[in-house]
Structure formats: C-alpha cells, structure tokens
Image: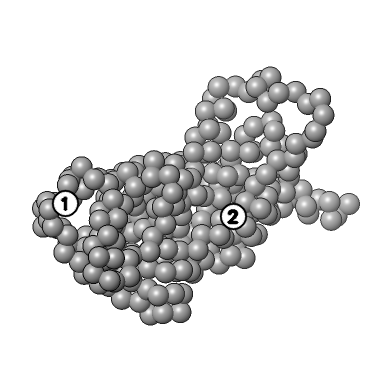
Amino acid sequence: MNVTLKIWRQKNATDTGKFETYDMKDINDHMSFLELVDVLNEKLEQEGKEPVHFDHDCREGICGSCAMYINGRPHGPMKGTTACQLHMRHFKEGETITVEPWRARAFPVIKDLMVDRSAFDRIIQAGGYISVNTGGVPDANEIPVSKDIADEAFNAATCIACGACVAACKNASAMLFVSAKISQLALLPQGQVERERRAELMISQMDAEGFGACSNTQACSAECPKEIDMLNIARMNREFLKAKVGSRAQEIH
C-alpha cells in the first residue's frame, strides 16, 4: 500500500517546529505504525537526513512509551490500542496520515515526536506508594480481599501512564491517570497507611506540574488505550475530600 506521512519535526523545546511530508510506497499492510516510522527512518538515513525521533520500548502495548497523535487522536483511530499495536491495514490506500507529539504544557517537546512525561513520575513520587515493613509480615496473597474489589483495583492498575488522557483532554488534565494510581492503592488493604494524604499530595503535585482541570467530556477515558473507567475520578475526588476534612479537623484540635 502507499500512504503519505505528514510528521511534526521540531529540533528542541524552543524551536517553532513544522510539518514535513514523506511519501511511503509499497508498505506492507501487516506492519505496525511504529514499524512504518522505522522504515521511514531507514530511508532518511540512507539519504543522509536526520531520522524522526520518537519514543518506544516494549512495542507490546504495555509500556506507554509510544506517545503520539495520529490523525488527531492519541495513539490513532483504533479504540483500546496503543500506537505500537496499531497496524497499517487500518488505514486506507493513498491516505495522508498526520503525526504529532502530545500537546500539553506539562509535556514539553524534547524533539520531533518525543515529549518529556517525567511530570507523571513526580506525581507518583509525591504519594503513589505504600509503606512496607520489613520482617515477619504476612504475604500479600494471605490478606483477604473480595474479588470485586481486587478486580476493580486491578483494572485501575492497568493504566500504563502513557499520557493519552492528557493529550485527549482540551484542558490537558491528568486526572484519569492520577485517579487510576490513587484507586489501585486506596482499594486494597496494603494502601491504607498513606490513604489519608495520598490524594491530597498527588493532586497537589499534579496542579504544580501545570496540568489542567477535568473537562468532564470523558474524552480521556474514550481515548485511553487501557480504557480506564471515569469512576476512578469520582473515587479520587472522594479521597481528596476526606483527606482535606481530616487535615482541617487536625488543625482545629
């Protein structure tokens, strides 16, 4: 198949950047989208030109590195699919495919399609952890947890922190990501030690990083490759309210 790639090229965070167009001919429709970019880069290197910079790692849809807009949608047109698992057979012959980096103040462009998503790491460092005492502690599998709660916590934990929720939101909100990371710990016994302040600390860091407020359009969940449920945001809000009420009560006493 033949397609045209219209790719954003930007030297660094301060460069204005621009789109460049590349004609790709005789492409195998079974290859993944990232393999298509690999083919383009091989072609550019053979021509003595600089290849397109983009993030990737596992290429199995579980690491969240392949962060890019494809035709105006995070990770591309397929629901519940990362860019590395998107295949060329889902595009039309002769189609022009526009590729851009995530667009968010909290995700500054490093180069071309690469953005700095370390803001997510700092949010996790602020409160996305549990206390584990050394010594004769019981094995986690010995702590009774109902299946419904375990399933809900697991579903929240499937978030791969790719940033598609931020890219999809008109306010560049990170609330779906933050709520998933809060939920996966708040639901389980192991996460109760820091529960009082976890939401307060993580949301405070989220705001400090420059992410916007929730737009309530549900675009984040619709574009999430792991289809994280919006109910996690409601749970995060409850956790935050309880933390603030508890903090206020301590101040009064």
Q: Residue at x 27, y 60 (%)?
A: 42
Give the spatial CA distance, label 1 vs label 2: 37 Å
Mark linked to residue 136: none
Residue 244 seen in the figure: yes
**Horizontal relation, residue 5 to residue 181: left or right:** left
Mark linked to residue 121: 2
Residue 208, horizontal then vertical, whole percent? 62, 65
Q: How many marks?
A: 2
Contact check, label 1 and label 2, Cβ < 8 Å: no
Mark 1 crowdedness (10 Å alpha carbons): few <14, some 14-19, many ≥20: some
Foreground label between 1 and 2: 1
Q: Earlier in the sequence, mark 1 or mark 2?
A: 1
Mark 2 crowdedness (10 Å alpha carbons): few <14, some 14-19, many ≥20: few
Relative to 45, residue 62 above or below: above
Relative to 139, residue 94 above or below: below
Q: Residue at x 55, y 67 (%)?
A: 210
Task: Identify the element where label 2 is drawn.
Answer: helix
Q: Residue at x 85, y 55 (%)?
A: 252
Residue 219 seen in the figure: no
Report the front residue among 83 and 196. 83
Where is residue 192, by image quadrant? top right
**Horizontal relation, residue 247 to residue 31: left or right:** right
Relative to 138, residue 172 above or below: below
Residue at numbered disc 1:
27
Report the front residue among 121 and 52. 52
Q: Amino acid at mark 2?
A: Asp
Q: Amino acid at mark 1?
A: Ile
Residue 165, horizontal then vertical, whole percent? 44, 53
Residue 48, horizontal then vertical, whole percent? 27, 71
